[in-house]
Image (tube, rainbow, N blue to C red):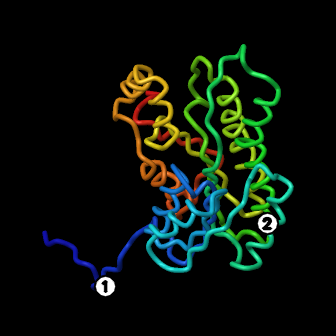
Amino acid sequence: MSDLMPTQNLAREPFNPMSLEGRTILVTGASSGIGKGTAIYLAKLGAKVIASGRNAERLQETLNEMPGEGHVGRVLDLSQHELIVPWMKEMCALYGPLNGLAHCAGIQSMRPLQTVNLDYIREVFDANLTAALVLAQGMRLKTCHTPQASLVFVASTSALRGASGNSVYAASKGGMAAMTRSLGIELVRDGLRVNCVAPALVDTPIAHAYRKLTEDGYQRLTAAHPLGIGYPEDVAAAVAFLLADTSRWITGSIMAVDGGLLA
């Protein structure tokens, strides 16, 4: 019995389902940490990145590390919620509609319940939840996204795992996870997929600051991660997966990127 052979020999073409060539993606929080790592990672995959952050000098440092051409930096303080949608309209009029948005900006803060006041609650929720909702409002506008665009939020394993002194931050990130599930369904009709990554401990300036406060606590937390702590590019890879065609059948999902912490 002879082996079957193809009827014709087709040239082998490069296959990279995570390629972002020709796509324009907005990355918030791109001046440091996960946002910076994500902007650089997406640029390596071929995306034209619009890097956003509050600090122009640090944003320029990110742009200097990004390969490729056509990237731009746009300074915006996302705490000014009323400016977000007009800013997005203006930006998309200049650079065209977005193929994707990676929302990496936010604040991380731990505070025991007895020290929590209303101003602190508003600050954390405004930074981590309100800004995300308003960005989604801007992204859904027809002039601000292409067909089959993707919106990815960066939440936290704090939304999925309790910890003492972390109730406000966890609630804000838990709200982001719940919002992702609802928007993932609601915005299908607008041609948008919405997903979220939930990182555990990542080697960022925030983690360095925590380590200075309590070395013993930092070591205990590190030990709870079977694969050790992560790096910004580990989270960026998951964000890239959710922005690319690799996730075209995924919406409303929460992806843990946690070194095995939740296992």
Residue 67 in the image: above or below residue 130: below
Of the residues shown, which amino acid type is indicated by label 2? Trp
Q: Identify the residue position indicated by label 1 in the image.
A: 11
> Do residues under tags 1 and 2 come within 8 Å of each other at their CB atoms?
no
Residue 240 vs residue 80, the one in the foreground? 80
The quadrant the N terminus occupies is bottom left
Determine whether the residue tagged by mark 1 lies in a helix, strand or loop: loop
Residue 208 as seen in the image, left or right of residue 100: left
Residue 77 as seen in the image, left or right of residue 9: right
Give the alpha-carbon distance from disc 1 to disc 2, as whole Å.
Answer: 46 Å
Which dot, 1 or 2, sits closer to the camera? 2
Residue 145 vs residue 251, the one in the foreground? 145
Q: Is residue 101 visible?
A: no
* Residue at 78%, 44% in the rendered image: 130
Residue 23, how many percent across, how many down?
Answer: 57, 73
Q: Residues within 10 Å of mark 2 (few under 14, many from 20)?
A: some
